[in-house]
Image (spheres, helix red, strand yellow):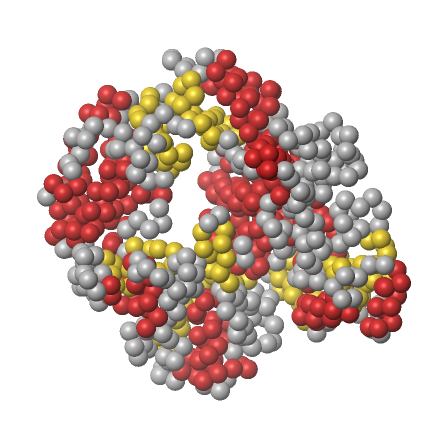
Amino acid sequence: MNRVEGWILDLYPKDGCMIVWLKTRDGRLVRLIDAWRQYVYASGEENDLINLANQLRIEGLSFEDKFVKPEDEKPSLVLKIPVRNIWEAERFAEKILAHGRYRRYELYNVDVKPSQLYLYEKRIYPFGYVKATTNQDRINWELQDSLESVNYEIPPLREINLSTSIQKKGRLPSRNDPVENITITSGSETLCSSGNDEQKKLLWLVEELEALDPDVVYTTDGDRFLFPYLAYRAMVNGIADMLVLGREPSPLHISPDKGQSYMSYGQAYYRPIPTRLFGRLHIDRENSLLYKDCGLIGIIEVARLCRIPVQRAASTTIGTSMTSAQFYQATLQDILIPWRKTNVEEPKTANELLIADRGGFYYEPIVGLHESVGELDFTSLYPTIMLKKNLSGETVRCKCCLNSKSRVPELGYNICEKKTGIVPRSLKLLLEKRRRYKELKTHTTDPRLRAIYEMRQAALKWTLVCAFGYLGFKNARFGRIDAHIATCAFARQILKETVHLAESKGFKLIHGIVDSLWLKKEDATEEDYLRLRAEVEEATGFEISFEGIYRWIVFLPSKIRRNVPVLNRYYGVFRNGKLKDRGIATRRHDTPPIIDRCIREILQVLAEAKGAEEFYARLPSIYELVQKYVHLLKSGDVSLEELVIRKHLSKNSGEYRHMVLQAIAANQLAKEGVTLNAGESVRYIITNSQSKLPEKRVLALELCQEHHSYDAEAYVDLLLSHVETMFMPFSADVLPARGSAE
């Protein structure tokens, strides 16, 4: 019997066991093996389950009592079936369904990752500090940590950055090109492979990783290109089984499967198959959405609270982590996790659909320039509603509380009063910790701690945003559209109550959208807004923050219909000098850097204005600033990096019917052997927008020469279009017409 203490760095299944890596206080890495088995569950009539058990004839079968649905008041008899891995689990599940002619059985816990099931069952989590007692091939875990802690300890991590340069034979790198150099950066030290022998370079990488023994390996596009490329080059050189980059003595394995394109809120995204470095953490900076906003510190916070391995939290959607938190709450209550969602939307009349399917509430903004406007924002409104009102797939319109006093506004749906739903249970700690991190960030004087709190609260913010979306997602295991509808109904009620209260206190509504309000009252002070905030919180029961008073703010109209306001397109500056902008060029991912720079300079000039009079007084200088950029673009001296336009592909390259610019660039790359998928980005330069030949209109950035020419008129037109958008509410002579800029 041995005991060891440390932080859980990584875990994964292997050979019917669970491998867990601990990092101890003295910096050692300890590999532990737990003879843990994965199980799937089958429910059905008792005789059918007995028949199934006799048919399977698997050692370790057993019968247990579990809740097969969250709304069940008592457990049901289920068959517990041991499996070796997740692939065997899904094969078994398909056979069982076929055996029951797809009517007799329901399957559970089939496609949940084994590492997550292990964390749920053992009540531990990544980067939790634990005491492990090993007895032969079994581990007893004692948690020495607390998820409630906001100042938990993380061990020092050895980090490196891995990159490679390639001897390109064509215009673009491919896996058929040999390695030129492999570079490892560790702190201020840079190591580089040498010599001409490619095999030796690859083996050098293996040796250096073993010597440096990093905990975290950072790459740029490691999942999509770097690691598949290195694995292929190792195969070409006959050393595929020697390319060991993790701590586990197994070679780098690259899945033959393609990545996945998916849609989220109308936007296509692409996720490549992630590369695991067993025993280490691999973070692909290019393909980790969470890392881009929150860094490794934010990823660790999510991994801990949602009980999901760090590498999985980094490489999958944020919704996957949120779902894991729900799975854990279900496991705590002995509720099985359905393989395929079975609960469906309640039937609705046409009139009921008209009332229910309305989304968030908004008040159209008053277009134009406004002075002394205050902004109030509800804090995590939707997830807080889900928590406080007990909104979950099994609680809205439950069968056990038909006479419940808790009702959904406008619709009258009953809400369960007997049990707290899985979704609210999963949100409680996330909301509480985010609130505490925001408070700590405000009050701490330590810049290092402030940065840590900011990254953690930002990570939780994105997780909470996903919680609402997943409530109505068709494949969410514990979501349901009725609960999604109910959340929107409560949000509409809260916003309307807040507006009525504000207006009763003499405030005029300038704009309101979902969970934010812009209000104005002559000579109102910050104390007036703070008093209003307190009254709103008392009246609604929901926390609302006062963001500040704007010196001035501009709400913009539609580009197509100038008399129609746009809900989320504005810019302004608070009295403390902080700028805020939404929906303009600086917030778009496809804005060329030079145009982004111009718009930011415009905002900085305007930010000096204390009010409307000074705002208008600065417009002549805006004219001069824009003319400066027009002349710069027309001079032809702008670097290609400053002109790059980055666009998301909504379709796979080659599937576009119309030759829009991003489709042309994607086709150019495809001809060079690089096929892009829906959701991936393509970067290009506009070369001749008026050309009759589509392939001449743009050029993919990867194919550009160092001094390639660009279409100056097209970029000037794009610049003036963005500038005009900002000044549409004002008279036509504020800025020159697009064609007159010289």
| 329 relative to 721 in the view: left or right | right
- Residue placed furthest toward the front: 350
| 119 relative to 74 in the view: left or right | left
Residue 420 makes an appearance in the image: no
Q: Nearer the viewer, residue 738 or 434?
A: 738
User: Where 353 sits versus 633, above or below?
Assistant: above
- Residue placed furthest toward the left: 742
Q: Which of 20 and 378 is in front in this view?
A: 378
Residue at x 45% of width, y 67% of height: 224
The answer to which image quadrant residue 608 occupies is top left
| 274 relative to 331 in the view: left or right | left
- Residue placed furthest toward the bottom: 238
| Image x and y of residue 185, in percent | 42, 65
| Image x and y of residue 139, in percent | 77, 63
Residue 361 makes an appearance in the image: yes
Q: In which quarter of the image is the C terminus?
A: top left
| 497 relative to 39 in the view: left or right | left
Q: Which of 580 and 503 is in front in this view?
A: 503
Q: Which of 18 and 60 is in front in this view?
A: 60
The count of marks equals 0
Q: Quadrant of the N terminus?
A: bottom right
| Image x and y of residue 44, in percent | 82, 59
| Image x and y of residue 627, in percent | 14, 41
Residue at x 49% of width, y 17% of height: 502
Residue at x 38% of width, y 13% of height: 522
